[in-house]
Image (tube, rainbow, N blue to C red):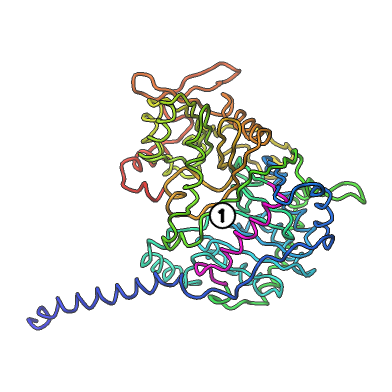
Amino acid sequence: MMDLVGKLPLLLCLFLVVSAVLVWLYGRFGRWPSGSEEHSLPPVEGETAIDRAIAPLLAGQADDAAGLSLVHANREALALRITAVRAAGRSLDLQYYYWKDDLTGGLLMREVIAAADRGVRVRLLLDDINAGLHDRSCIALDAHANISVRLFNPSRARTDRFRRGLEMAMRAFRATRRMHNKAFIADGRIAIMGGRNIGDAYFDADEDTNFRDLDIWMIGKAVADAGGMFDRYWNSPVVLPIGSLRTPRPKYLGRLRADLAELADRPAARLLLSDIEASGEDASPPLTPEAALHWCADVEVLADPPEKALMARRSNWIFRDLMPAMMAAKDRLRIVSPYFVPGVDGTSALTDLTDKGVRVEVLTNSLAATDVAAVHGGYARYRRRLLRGGVALFELKADHVPGDPRRIKIFGSRTASLHSKAFTVDGERGFVGSVNFDPRSVSLNTETGVLFSHRALVAEVDGIIDIEMAPDSAFALSLHRGLIRWRDAGEGGRPRTLYREPEAGRIRRLTAAVIRFLPVESQL
C-alpha cells in the first residue's frame, strides 16, 4: 500500500502528460492536410442558361461594378435558390452553417443532385457542428461523381456520440469555433449571401416559428470576390473532405434519391413548389429578384479568414472592417441583430456615438421571440446602460405575422423570430451578412457579409427596419425610475405599456435571469 501511495505523484504526472499529448493531438487535427486544392470554375460567355440570362444585365457596366438586390421575403429566397440550381450548367459552390434534413432542405438537396446528374460540379461546404448529426446524407452526396462535400473544423468521431462528445471536450477551445458563413454561388455568375441557412424556418415552411431574414443577391465583380472567399475556405487546412473521415457510400445515394423523391411528392412539397414554378407552359421562374437591381462601385464582400478557427490572422477579422464603418456615423446608426450582446466595449462605443448626437437604434429579439433564451440573458444585463446612454432599443414581438393563408393549413406557423443581421449608417452605407453583434461573432465564429454604399439600396434596408420597429411589430423600450418598460401598439391600435418581459413564459424568464449572472458571456 505504501509503495502505491509513493507512486501516486508519478502516476498523476504520467496521466497529466498523456492527457496533454492527447489534447495537443486533437488540437492539431484541424491543421492536417486537407483535400486536393480546387478553385472556382471561370465563367464562359453564353455557355449556360445563367450566363445567357445575366449577360444583358452586365452589358454596359464597368468591370468592377456589382449589381445588388435585397431579398427579404422568405418564399422568394427559396425560389431564387431553386431556380438558380435548375438553371446552373457549370458549377454550384454552397457554403452553410447548417443544411437541415427537413422539407425545404430536402427539396433543395434534390435539385442539387439533379444538377450534378447533368454534369454540374457541386462543392458543398458545411460546418461540422451540425453536419455530424446527419453524416449519412453527406456521405451519400459525396459518393456522387460530381459532388464533393467538405466539413469545417470536423470531429474525427463520426458514428459514436460518446466519442464525439469526448473529443469535443478534449479540444473544447477549438470545438467552439464554428463556420457561420452563408454563401450560394451558381455558375460563378450569381451569388446569394446573407443570414439564411437552409431549412424550413428560413423559407416560411416551419410549423412553429419562421425567421425574418435578409439576403443580398449579386451579379458582377462581387460574385468573383465571393468565389475567392469560398476557395479560401474550401482549400483551408481547417476544412477536410468528408471522404477522409468516412467512406462514401454509393448505396446511400440511391436511398437518398428515393427518400427525396417521396418527399417531393408530399402535399406540402407540391404546394410549396407550386408557388415557385411558373404556371405558363413555356414560362420559367425568374432568376432575378423582384426588387430593383442596384449597381454599386463601392461593394466589399467581407469574410473572416478560415484560420480564425486556429486563432490566427487576428489582424483581418471581419469586425476590424465593420466597427469603423459603424462608428463613422454622423447622424444615424441602425443595427439589426437577433443575438445582441454588446459587452462593455460595445456598449461604450454605442453610447459614445449618442454623446456625439448620433441617433443609435438597435432591433433585436424579445425574450418571447428569440430561439436562444440564454443569449437574451446576456443581452439583458446591458439594457439599462444602453437606455441610460441614449440608445433606442426595439425588441421584435413573437405575435402572429401576415402570411399566405394556404401555408397555414399545412405548416401552421404564424409566429416570427428575428434572424436578419444588418446595419445602416447615415442612409448612405449598409451591411447585410451573417454577423451578429455578440462575442461569438466577434471572436469564435467565422462570418461573412456584404458592405455597400448606395443610397437607394440602403433606403430599402431602412424601409424593412422601419416595418420591423413599428409598434405593431416590436416593443419600444424605455426607462422609468430605473425600471424597464415595454411599449407597443396594443390591441385595436391602443398603445399599451408592459412592466415585465412581454409574452415570455416562466421557464424562459428564469433561463434568461440565470444566464445574466453566469460567467458565460464569451460563449453567447
Q: Residue at x 47, y 29 (%)?
A: 393
At 37% across and 35% down in the image, what residue appears?
348
Q: Amino acid at mark 1?
A: Asn
Q: List the single residue furthest toward the bottom.
A: 3
Taking the magenta stretch, the answer to whether it contains residue 218 is yes
Residue 123 position (above or below residue 461): below
Report if residue 191 lies within the magenta region: no
Residue displayed at 44% across by 44% down:
438
Q: Helix or strand or loop: what does disc 1 sit on?
A: loop
Identify the residue under disc 1: 181
Q: Residue 474: x and y, percent?
A: 54, 29
**Of 342 and 313, the residue lying toward us:** 313
- Quadrant into which the N terminus falls: bottom left
Of the pair 75 and 500, the residue shown nearer to us: 75
Residue 373 higher or lower than 89, as above or below: above
Quadrant of residue 229 within the rendered picture: bottom right
Range drawn in magenta? 217-241
